Amino acid sequence: MNSLATPVASRSASSTSSAPIGQTRGQLNGILFVALFAAAVTQLAALPFISNLGLSPLIVGIVGGAIYGNALRDGMPESWASGVNFSARKLLRIAVGFFGLRVSLQEIAQVGLPGLTVSVLVVVSTLAIGTWAGMKLMKLDRDTALLSAAGSAICGAAAVLAFESTLQSEPHKSAMAVGSVVLFGTLSMFLYPLALHLGWLHLDTLGVGLFFGGTIHEVAQVVGAASNVSPEATHIATIVKMTRVMLLVPVLLVIGMWVNRSRNSAQTDGSGTKRKLAIPWFALGFLALVIVNSLHVLPGAATHTLNTLDTFALTMAMTALGIETRIEQIHRAGPRALVTGAIVYAWLIGGGLAITIAVERLLG
């Protein structure tokens, strides 16, 4: 009996110990797959007919990932799913934190009080109006409404990623929010300069910088739109846009506390204990790296290299989110989410212009 039992027990132990190794190998393969996919996406986004539209690798990544995830997902081994999930969750937190190296306090100071005031008023009002319109008018769930509002209010796809991590929402909700950023942000690139050249917008260089930087969704879209006006307007618009990016930290902290309070509305999670506060620690990392960048601790070449790697990491995260997205889930709220984005966009144009004019008159 003992001679028969020993080999069986040995095989069982061997099988158990090999399972974690197989899981780790599968996760690494999944991460490598996402990295190779993101590398291809980066090359695709660099093509002139795509880059001229102001579509960053992040946007192309989630679109390419969604196409693969819905058309060819069966071709990916199931064991790789954990690596895809790692890229869409943990990697994105790290990448959003390193986004802070793109902002410096000196740049924000260059546009002074007018730039900061426009940024704060646009971000707060857009978040409030977008969330209200999404939840009350369009009957969207809280996460979808917040993600759509955040992408428009702060910094496009990067803000959607940050909020998705804090809210721990489902990938298809982020995909809908990114879709809104792509549609209305790209429209702004062409509409804003055209309206200015046709004389519909009566703004000087400072006003153009404040309005473009304060209301257009993505950083690349801001640069693309303002570059059709003047180098001075582009410089101001970019700094105002990065000031909006800076506001990601306090907004995430407030949202984290709000989400925690709503989850604890019943005071317990069913086991008799309160849930822990959902503090987005990567946001604090973002703030720390803004300070590092402001102190010029790192050489310029090192900062450039880290920003390039960070863009690639964000592209990986967006690609992974796309792979996890299912089109049928988007169809359920697609029209309502699009209308919510349109309402927010209308506010960014009308309300953003009113804020810009008022601030420039008072503080410019």
Image (spheres, grey):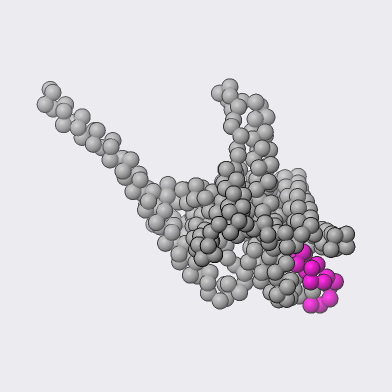
Would you say residue 101 is visible in this rendering? no
In the rendered image, which quarter is residue 187 located in? bottom right
- Residue at (60%, 39%) from the top-left corner? 279
User: Which stretch did the figure color magenta?
Assistant: 197-212
- Residue at (79%, 77%) from the top-left corner? 197
Q: Quadrant of the C terminus?
A: bottom right
Q: How many marks are shown on the rendered structure?
A: 0
- Residue at (43%, 59%) from the top-left corner? 35
Q: Nearer the viewer, residue 210 or 136?
A: 210
Would you say residue 51 is visible in this rendering? yes
Q: Is 210 covered by the magenta stretch?
A: yes
Q: Quadrant of the N terminus?
A: top left
In the rendering, at what x and y percent does residue 199 appear? 84, 76
Q: Nearer the viewer, residue 154 or 234?
A: 234
- Residue at (41%, 53%) from the top-left corner? 31
Asked if 258 appears above or below 67 in the picture, the reply is: above
In the rendering, at what x and y percent does residue 185 appear? 68, 64
